[in-house]
Amino acid sequence: MEKSLITLDKGTVCSSWNYCRQRLASGSIDGTLSIFDSLDPNSSSFTSTSQLKVNETSIVKVVWIPPEYGDAVATICLDGTFSLWEECEQDAQSIKWVMCKLSERNESRVLDLQFGVSSTSLKMVAAHSNGLVKVYELLDPLDLKKWQLQAEFQNVIDTVPTLGKPSCVSASISWNPQRGESNLASFALGFNSELPQFNSSKVWEFDEAHQRWLPVAELALPEDKGDQVYVVAWAPNIGRPYEVLAVATSKGIAVWHIGLLPDTDGKLSVEKVALLSGHEGEVWQMEWDMGGMTLATTGSDGVVRLWQSNLNGVWHEQATLETTST
Amino acid sequence: MPGLLSENNNSLVPFSPEVRDPIVYHLHNTPKPPISRLSISWSRGNCLLVSFFRTKLPSSESDTNAVENPNEEIGGKVVEVKLSSENGEVDDVQRRKIAYDSVSPFALLQSHKISAAALSNMSLGSSNPFNWWQHIMDYSKDIKALLENSKPPPSSVIEDPMEVLQTVEEPNSLKAAWELLEIFYADKQAQPWLPERLVDWLADYDSLLSSTMTTVHSKLVDLQKELVNLQAIEDDPKYWEGLSSALAVGWLDIVVKLLRLHGSYQLDQLGNRETENGLVEAVAVLVSKMPRMRSEWNESILGECFKSKPDFMKSWEKWRGQIAKLECSAFWVQCDHRQTREGLKNLLQIMLGNSSILNTVTCHWMELYISNFLYVRPFTMGLDGMYSLAQKCMQVKPLSNTHCLMGLILGILGDNIEVVLAECSRSFGPWMVAHAIELLTAGNTQAEVLLHEERYNLGGISIEELHRLVYAQVLSSHPLTWQIAPVYLTSCTKQGMGLLEILLYKQPVLHNQLLLKVLEICRLYDLYSISSTIMKIAGVYHWKHGRKGSGVFWLQQAQDEVRLNKIAQQLFDFVGKPISDTSFKQWEGLIELLGSEARTAGGLEFLHKYRDFKKSLQQVQDGKAREAAQQAIESLILLMKNPSTPQRFWLPLLHDSLMLLNWQERPLLNVSQTNLLLNKLQDLSIARLLPDYVEADLPTQALGSVRLALATNLGRVILEE
């Protein structure tokens, strides 16, 4: 049932697959980025093709950019900076990874970073430890060096100036995976901080007419708004009349349905359809399959769990993947 | 996902609403503990990629060096997990073969459906139900044929007179299950003869049930092995046991064959065992004359066939009378061989429907069930009767270990489509469900409503569509089968195209062959937007990896104006720069590729002229002096005269031509040409005073040297003229 694909080097702490699962980028504790490639689409043998040092501190997260913009990854490092690295080849001979962008090192650390394709351009959202969200836009689709800061805001619905500065432990961003000309750019974001207003996951949508980002939905019941959010995951929608998102907090994994059309005040209707418990402790990661029907999750209990909804719309744990050694 | 509808008020099934416990998969290929972190990612379909890390993620910068264990050999592992519950009886290769072979029957049936729907829409009268049954049966037969095991079991060339059991092909549960569905749902003409169809079904597949327990089949297999070694088989109780068991389940040909092996038939027995032999033969004749109600007659099956119930009943009564008469015959007293006497009487009791004997000679409840159809209730009709009989038989012979086919049979007899679907899904996997739904919905209104109703809980799709999507996901997870997933996805009206687009987007299109394949699929199903995205991916990849030509080609195919404009702008950067031969060729090629379509307002026209100029200039340097130089001058004049030449390139152009302006042999420009260039130079000096002037990237003395060269040229021309 399972097949071993790659053996990772000592000190590897994170990894990320590209869009077609033919390349893996892994980051290690000494700041080295490694790229593994499968040269034949039908085979499952991978070889390490590139290694480069991107930082003096550990890499904590690797994210691929959408393939329409080239082969590039963003790495978030322990010192709170992120950098963007692109694979280039001169005269079809020598492959080189070059740095396209490096964030400045300052007091707030970058906690999560995700790319989203909108109808006009590539956007990059970065969530910072001071509770700020920064949205960058790529100016030239062929040049990953040219970014412009498009917006900067806090993950709160009512802007109260006296909120103070939170210090966030982690953040999770998930773009609406739908790509299409007609689609508005939107993403969901939740924080894990000590300031409750920042925590609850909100859906942000780009208002083209006024060129600004607006919160269109909040994914938390009134009594749960302060819950610290570990992960959010937006499911692909292949034709449902509603969107599905999963939000993991200390209370469990909530599955939300979000309406497609806004009501009169511009908000989207939300409905919490399930609260799943299974992982004891923190949830590390949640991934939807390509049809948006199965949610795979993993957390500090070291188990992978698969969740599905049955024919009556009741969510349940469908399978568990355990390592024999644990 | 596959499972049972329950809990709702309109629930049809008396099944408990609670959700089944999760299936636990144990992964063995993982690195040794401690594992400090996991990472997951879905690949195509239902294939999950899991990374295991042994190094702990440091929580702060100072923490970095504290966690590495020098004894560790590897830092972690990435494994691929295929999540599908498939029937273990079929291996991967066989499964792929089935997947490929079932595409065309499925597609054919869908196209018949579409044309039937079109016909009824055009109100040309409802489509002919007979024709429709024919399509369903053709489909079912095609699928059944591909489930056959291709390799027949080894058999000897010479027919063995002792061989009582003949196996034509190795049976498999998948085919057995399909045949059950066909009997009950698709083959409407067989409805009046359901019990007899089940008799045939058990004859074909009883051996499958032997895997979990003793059956009539396994008894006969044992007997077969011993036959060769037995001198007088009629003395062996196993012989008689085998006979009664085979008779009980209606394997008449085997019974007759076995009876004819009786010792009394041997030539040396003539004289002393005549009566005994007569009795044996009398039973054999009765067995072979058993009346049966069947639709079609198969040569290999013994008995007398009747199509209508009255004829059958008449003949049945007569046959039973003959058996009863033989039972009471006086000849039994003259039969000295005790085992023969008892064995034969036992057979007669079976044919008379003695339930306690039927109970002892059969093993599996299914066998008892069949024997009841044959001898106790030959006129049982309707599912209700069949279901209650099945329950009775199961009470008599409870199973400790149920075979996957039994759940299916019970679902069918209980007339519960949901149980049938759940059993198909659980025991035989997504392939079975996706294909069997066609049989279940054929002409069954209740099933049709259940399976075709669009459900909000499923995201607005029907159960039928859900199962097709699930099967398509299974196909998508293997590089050798993803290409057939579109056939199933396009038969899903609501969400199939959405999933197909995602599937295509996730293909590694950097491999040219795959790219062409993906684009072909896009073309076939009119998926323009995704095909353009895929061509963009390919274009950008090639452009960034030094294959500029391919890059431009694919971006043009994708009609990606934004990126093509950016490329055209990059080409302007070459203007006025000293460039090497190879890069000039590349640059020239790109201009060719970009074509003549106006992109950046007349920019390309300029680039084309500039190319001509640059070419002749290069020839001058190559030493083809004179004519080339003259040609270069003409190109230069053309460029400078042309209003589409951007002003910012005037000086670079003139600077490039310094060599021409200072031509040693003789001046190349005439007076009016020189004046033109001088005027341009003057315009330029005025423009330089304007705030938005962009200084060309040239040596500071460039303007001065051009000015001087032009003045010198003018002087020389005046002298010459």
Image: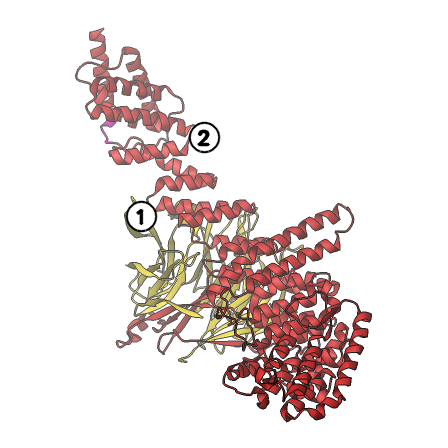
Q: Residue at x 20, y 12 (%)?
A: B716
Residue B597, label in figure? 2
Q: What color was chain A assigned in the picture?
A: yellow
Foreground of the two, B242 or A157:
B242
Q: Are marks 1 and 2 on the same chain?
A: no
Q: What color was chain B assigned in the picture?
A: red
Return the x and y of residue B18 as percentages of the image width and height.
64, 78
Q: In the image, what residue type sits under mark 1?
A: Glu
Q: In the image, what residue type sits under mark 2?
A: Glu
Q: Residue furthest left?
A: B664
Residue A18, label in figure? none
Residue B489 against residue A281 in the figure, above or below: above
For the image, the number of numbered tags is 2
The answer to whether residue B434 of the structure is visible from this angle is yes
The answer to whether residue A147 of the structure is visible from this angle is no
**Chain of the residue under label 2:** B
Q: Magenta stretch containing residue B551, yes or no?
A: no
Disc 1 to disc 2, C-alpha distance? 29 Å
Say what secondary structure mark 2 lies in: loop
Residue A218 against residue B272 in the figure, above or below: above
Residue span colored magenta: B699-703
Q: Using residue B348 as the reference point, say whether residue B33 is left or right of it.
A: left
Contact between marks 1 and 2 (CB within 8 A): the answer is: no
Return the x and y of residue A51 as percentages of the image width and height.
29, 59
Q: Residue furthest front?
A: B271
Q: Using residue B212 as the reference point, say whether residue A21 is left or right of it.
A: left
* Quarter of the picture holding the C terminus of chain A: bottom left
Residue linked to disc 1: A89
